[in-house]
Amino acid sequence: MSPSVLTSFPSDQTLFEQFSRDDDRGACSGAFKRVKLYHNPSSPSDADSVGTAAGASSCSSGDDPEALSRQNLPVDEDRTVRSDDDVGLVTAHQAPHEESDVSSSGTPELLDDGYQYLPGSTKLRRLLERSDRLIVCPGVFDGFSARVAMSVGFEGLYMTGAGTTASRLGMPDLAIAQLHDMREQAEMICNLTPYGPPVIADMDAGYGGPIMVAKAVQQYARAGVAGFHIEDQILSKRCGHLKGKEVVDMNTFLMRIRAAKKAKDQIRSDIVLIARTDALQTRGYDECIARLKAARDLGADVGILEGFTSKEQARQAVKDLAPWPLLLNMIENGASPLISTQEAQEMGFRIMIFSLAALSSAYVAMKATFEKLKYEGVTGVPQHVTPKKLFEVVGLDEMREIDEGAGGAAFSKV
């Protein structure tokens, strides 16, 4: 809403109605087209302009959907912003790209004055610029699994919805985790260290209509998420490697993509938008390609075709959508054949996530340890796994440096 329209500050309800309706209209839903907008009677011409300037353009076949999503808040070529209160981007005073490259771990190189902070989304985009690279992301679900993955040195991390639901709620991946569950977990993981790898997070089906999709995207961006994928399953969705999946129609899926694109543009965020289709199980391969091409044309940065049934099908999808980058979700013992990172790179995939890597291995290790404790009376944990070792994994040395650097001595001996 343009500040020039208002002569007095509207109520919270009025603001909510305005922004929420704009979100829905920008996604071409039309669900709330009869909701009355805030109107300043003393300035009718300006008030009327709110309805057109804030995303009220029609979504007829002659309109350019990508232009519609960009019409309010464009981002310049360097993806920089010009004020200090913008969220999720490299600010205008940041050094140019050529002065700070990304290392093999996805973190900025060491400059003369120390590490330069970069948002995760910028790190991920720079990695994607390297067309000869495959970004491998293990699936993590909490702070500890993320720390372990970072200690190994991966270029990126993937916060799995299935793993988060299982670890945070103790429930299966059946649309039980809601936006607040996923956003809180993602924010914690993304902010474990300012120089960690970029984190891609699951956004399921967007947690509702276009308004909720927009809310989710902006919350993820503010949390520090580098990229997210949003899918075309119905809201009562399930893990993509279970049977019985149902998907929404093409128009509903594209409404989600439009809402996501407009939401990130509204806050000038370069968070990576990943469009995912689960339509293969019920609609077939050609429908999947059509959906992903349409999402690409609306501004999605990366695509996922979930649940490949053969390696040949995976390879063909990369060819059919080239040069658009594709992400491969590898769940071992799932619905798809096993594809190694080397094979995925040769096929031309740009990102590869192993969604259940941490959850599956944690289950095996914990169950074996608990059974040993129950039947033998000891855990049998290796001698080198001391309490101090575990705390070192989760940042003990970093915390001690902070304390000592401030003149403290509380943790000089541990």
Image (cartoon, rainbow, N blue to C red):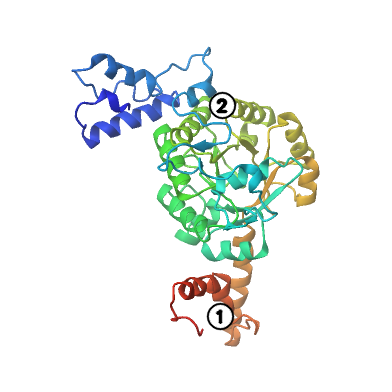
Quadrant the N terminus occupies: top left
Q: Observer-nearest residue: 60 or 77?
A: 77
Q: Can residue 412 be seen in this view?
A: yes
Residue 375's place in the image compared with 127, above or below, is: below
Question: Foreground: 74 or 170?
Answer: 74
Q: Marks 2 and 1: which is nearer the front?
A: 1
Closer to the camera in the image, 112 or 289: 112
Residue 384 locus on image (x, y percent): 65, 82
**Residue 285 screen position, x and y as percent:** 69, 31
Residue in the image at 27% along x and 19% along y? 47
Q: Can residue 177 be seen in this view?
A: no
Residue carrying label 2? 298
Instruction: Name the amino acid, label 1.
Output: Lys
Name the residue located 62 percent from the left edge and 57 percent from the top edge: 112
Q: Where is residue 382 in the image (x, y as percent from the top left)?
A: 65, 82
x then y, percent, for residue 46: 28, 17
Type of amino acid at the residue the image marks with label 2 = Leu
| Residue 316 sits in quarter | top right
Q: In this view, which residue lies farthest toward the front?
A: 112
The image shows residue 149, relative to residue 320, as above or below, that is below
**Mark 2: secondary structure:** loop
All told, the count of numbered labels is: 2
Quickly name the residue at label 1: 388
**Observer-nearest of 341 and 76:** 76
**Is 383 situated above or below 252?**
below
Residue density around tag 2, few if under 14, some if 14–19, many if 20 or more, within 10 Å: many
Task: Identify the disc placed on residue 203.
Answer: none
- At horizontal 54% and vertical 18% (from top left) the residue drawn is 64
